[in-house]
Image: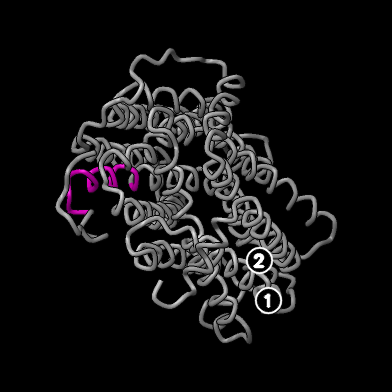
Amino acid sequence: MTASPAGTGTFQLLATRRFGPFFATQFLGAFNDNLFKNALVVLLTFRAADWTTLSPGLIANLAAGLFILPFFLFSATAGQLADKYDKARLARLVKGLEMAIMALAAAAFWMHSFAGLMAALFLLGVHSTLFGPVKYALLPQHLREDELVGGNALVEAGTFVSILLGTLAGGVLAGTVAQPAWIAFGGFAVAAAGYVASRGIPAAPAPAPELAVNLNPLSETWRNLAFAGRERSVLLAIVAISWFWLYGALFLAQFPAYAKYVLGGGESAVTLLLAVFTVGIGIGSLLCDRLSRHRLELGLVPLGAIGLTLFGIDLYFASPAATDGSAPQALAALLGRPGVWRVLADLLLLGAFGGLFIVPLYALIQLRGEAAHRARIIAANNIVNALFMVVGALGAGALLDGAWTIPELFGAGALANAAVAVGLCIALPEFGRRFVACLTPGR
């Protein structure tokens, strides 16, 4: 681990070479993924007939599936590569791949190739899959233990902000450029900036350079889960993180329909919901470092779970009566509707308590996972995350098709979150003990 001055503040980490370039690299990568993905979906939704005979709804689901598929296929390999090779070098190679993908996307736009665009989207998923283990396994090599929670807090806050900004930028690009190839040129510029940033990441030597890479994703995934299972708390943290992504995706996926058919708003309302939730995640993530006093504090996990449950339930009760969505209100008029500000407060607090929940869990994996297997454990986590999100999306779709309302789905998710939280505290009593200790004065 690189030496550093004692007492480095959370935001001061951004000015250090051992964190700043890495943060910029991961921020720009997440921004670019969402810029391209959202621009592509918006473009093909409103100009579908110019590109394919598929329906816009099918295109959106196909795009989501192609982007997440690589996490199942290549996460196990990505984890092995991050344990076998220097992570800083891998980061630069991944950024080079990102530029090549954007060049492919530009060619696909220019040749009007729907298949080429889908291939580029799939490869962006590969890019994210390869970078995932590097992203979380690199931090413990460059940060001290008392900086690790703060570093994770910045990464989580930055990731959600980059998702928001990338989504907005993608929508703007898709709606304004005359030649769609400019979308890919914009993505190439962002990828190039990410590559430049990655050049500043200090060396992060491989913990297992002798590792023989196993290309079988099934057997290697099972082996990675076995590595995680050597420390019970790490395996439970993976389950908890995966549940969080399922729960969060449950809300995020419904924002467009919720804004239109429950709140009665338009596209600006969707942006507002996403922005409020994102700001909440950032606040909670950064607050986590302060509340934990710059160390791993598992007592914040039950606290985060309580907030995720309470404000998910309150969102069910705060949601106004459904509309037909035929006459979307302007944002100013929407904010004047009874209950809308309560909905926004619930989303802000859901995000904040989500930050408190998720940051200590990532730090737990990094600190308690075996150093020689850390990247492969992160890879196993990414696979389980993706599995939970797919299962959650299928379950939510089935419930909504079964005549459930979106607020009812939110309420049911909040109750399920309470059950998961109780189960985690029973499976690992340390969560409950530390929560009680957090509530004790003078702890």
Is label 2 in a helix, a strand or a loop? helix
Comparing labels 2 and 1, the label whose residue is closer to the camera: 1
The quarter in which the C terminus is drawn is bottom left
Res. 175 visible in picture:
no
x then y, percent, for residue 257: 66, 62
The quarter in which the N terminus is drawn is top left
Circle 2 residue: 258
Say if mark 2 contacts mark 1, CB within 8 Å: yes
Q: Residue at x 78, y 57 (%)?
A: 400
Circle 1 residue: 319
x then y, percent, for residue 261: 70, 68
Amino acid on which the number 2 mark rests in the picture:
Tyr
x then y, percent, for residue 440: 47, 75
Q: Which residue is nearer to you in this view: 340 or 144?
A: 144
Residue 16 counted in the magenta span: yes
Q: Main secondary structure of the magenta part?
A: helix
Mark with earlier residue (2, 1): 2
Q: Which residue is nearer to you in this view: 111 or 195?
A: 195
